[in-house]
Image (cartoon, rainbow, N blue to C red):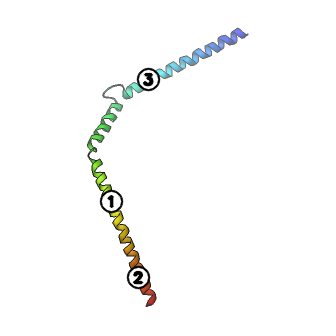
């Protein structure tokens, strides 16, 4: 009885390993179709990413300058907000007196 269970367990393990090898083989072949050659989909995506990186490389200095300008504008708008607050307070005070 023990020998039969041992043999059955060994056969189950072999069946599992066999199925695992078949599935890994199918996964490898699918991955090779996706990215195994220079004309594959993955290679084309990589080429596109490099092209985008090259075409947009000049934007970084401009964005830095834009951020500096927007920070300066934000500070000046804070001053304008203060002045508009004073005008609104004066107008509200003038309405109450009239």
Q: Which residue is nearer to you in this view: 1 or 92?
A: 92
Q: Residues within 10 Å of mark 3 (few under 14, many from 20)?
A: few
Which residue is labeled 1 in the image?
A: 70
Alpha carbons under labels 2 and 1: distance apart = 30 Å
Among the 4 quarters of the image, the one containing residue 30: top left
Depth-wise, is mark 3 or mark 2 nearer the camera? 2
72 to 89, vertically: above or below: above
What numbered label is drawn on residue 94? none
Q: CA distance from mark 3 to mark 1?
A: 51 Å
Measured along the vertical axis of the image, is residue 63 above or below residue 97?
Answer: above
Residue 90: mark: 2
Q: Position of 64 compared to 3: left or right?
A: left
Q: Position of residue 83 (x, y in %)?
A: 37, 75
Task: Give the image location of residue 73, x and y in percent.
Answer: 32, 63
Which residue lies under the disc numbered 3?
A: 28
Residue most extreme to the bottom = 98
Q: Residue at x 44, y 89 (%)?
A: 97
Q: Which of the 4 quarters of the picture holds residue 93? A: bottom left
Secondary element type, mark 3:
helix
């Amino acid at each position: 009885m023990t020998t039969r269970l041992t043999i059955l367990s060994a056969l189950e393990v072999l069946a599992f390993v066999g199925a695992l090898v078949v599935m890994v083989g199918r996964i490898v072949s699918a991955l090779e179709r996706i990215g195994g050659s220079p004309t594959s989909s993955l290679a084309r995506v990589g080429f596109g990413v490099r092209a985008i990186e090259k075409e947009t490389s000049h934007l970084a200095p401009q964005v830095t300058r834009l951020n500096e300008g927007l920070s300066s504008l934000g500070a000046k708008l804070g001053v304008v907000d203060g002045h508009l607050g004073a005008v609104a307070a004066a107008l509200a005070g003038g309405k109450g007196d009239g």
